[in-house]
Amino acid sequence: MAVLSIVGLTATGKTSLAHKALELLNQPVHFLSADSRQVYADLPVTTGADLPSGAQELNLHGVAFLDLDQEWSAGQFRELGWQVFRQAEDDWGDVVVVGGTGLYHQALWSTDVGWSVPPNLKLRSELDKLGVLDLQNKLKKQNLKKFSEMNQSDQLNPRRLIRAIELEMAELPEINPPDFLGQWQQQGLTIGLTASNEWLAEKISQRVDARFELALKEVTDNLDSLRGNSPAATSTGVRELMALIEGQLGAEECRHLWIQSELQYAKRQKTWWQKTKGIVWHDVFKKDWRQTALDRISIWRTQLD
């Protein structure tokens, strides 16, 4: 078994590249989506869960299988990913992990039990009322060593402090990582796709325009569910379309804000992935980027045999 990861920025063609790489991999190929919002079954267009046509040979995991009121976390994704890894090993096949949610890729290879601790919503509601200093002091009382080991940015980040406190107060579950997890990571290949801000702005604008009417219908059809505490309501595009439906925005303003949200998301992705080592980057603006990436995948897979 081998694991190919395709990461990077939204709208750069990660899924398309994965589809083209299938014939270079050992069959059956298991396709694992590492996207935090494409899991919702009722919003495939809005969230961009669009698999290329002709991809029937994929064993697809992690796309369009949850109801809108269901939570999905990096820890749950890790459990799904480990199941896929075991299945691929049994099948003598390969795995392609595709998606831009960096936290999911990080969790997939980690054996830290903390990933499997679910959010404690009641505790978070209480801690949300505290300031940074109070959160720091609370964590220090619980585990001074853990606070000291956090970097300065995390020590000043309420969300990170709350999660640290949450883990200290939780009963840690047992986890069962695949036996050869580290070996698969060392032998794996990670391809990253990037582009200039100008190219992304044009591509994202085209994608939003192409999806707008169908996405508007999706959100309209599911408006009651999204108005609750649906995790899917935080998806890029959903908030803007809900505001349009409820008369808070005009169509053109909605479109503009959706595009801006996508661009801001791409900026956050770029910041995340720039800190990650071991990625073979390809600029999708270059004419021959796709063939160069496929050649690299072919050489890597051949060397593993």
Image (cartoon, rainbow, N blue to C red):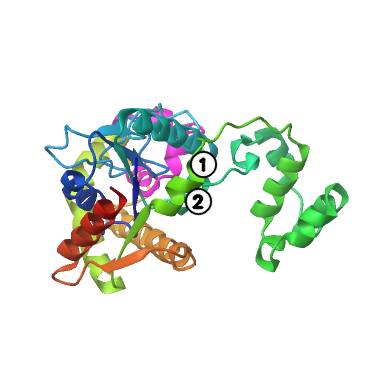
Q: Position of residue 81 (x, y in %)?
A: 43, 36
- Describe residue 251's horizontal placement relative to residue 237 as left or right: left
Please name the residue that numbered disc 1 is placed on.
Answer: 74
Q: Secondary structure at mark 2?
A: helix
- Check if mark 1's residue and mark 2's residue have beta carbons within 8 Å: yes
- Specify the label residue 106 is tagged with: 2
Quadrant that contains the N terminus: top left
Q: Nearer the viewer, residue 33 or 264?
A: 33
Magenta span has 33? no
How packed mark 1 is, by other alpha carbons closer than 10 Å (few <14, some 14-19, many 20 or more), is many
- Describe residue 65's horizontal placement relative to residue 59 as left or right: right
Residue drawn at 42 percent across, 61 percent down: 269
Q: Nearer the viewer, residue 13 or 178?
A: 178
Alpha carbon distance from label 1 to label 2 = 9 Å
Q: Magenta stretch: give its range.
A: 220-244
Residue drawn at 57 percent across, 31 percent down: 176
Q: Position of residue 11 (x, y in %)?
A: 27, 57
Q: Nearer the viewer, residue 269 or 179?
A: 179
Residue drawn at 37 percent across, 33 percent down: 89
In the picture as drawn, the residue positioned furthest to the right comes out as: 141
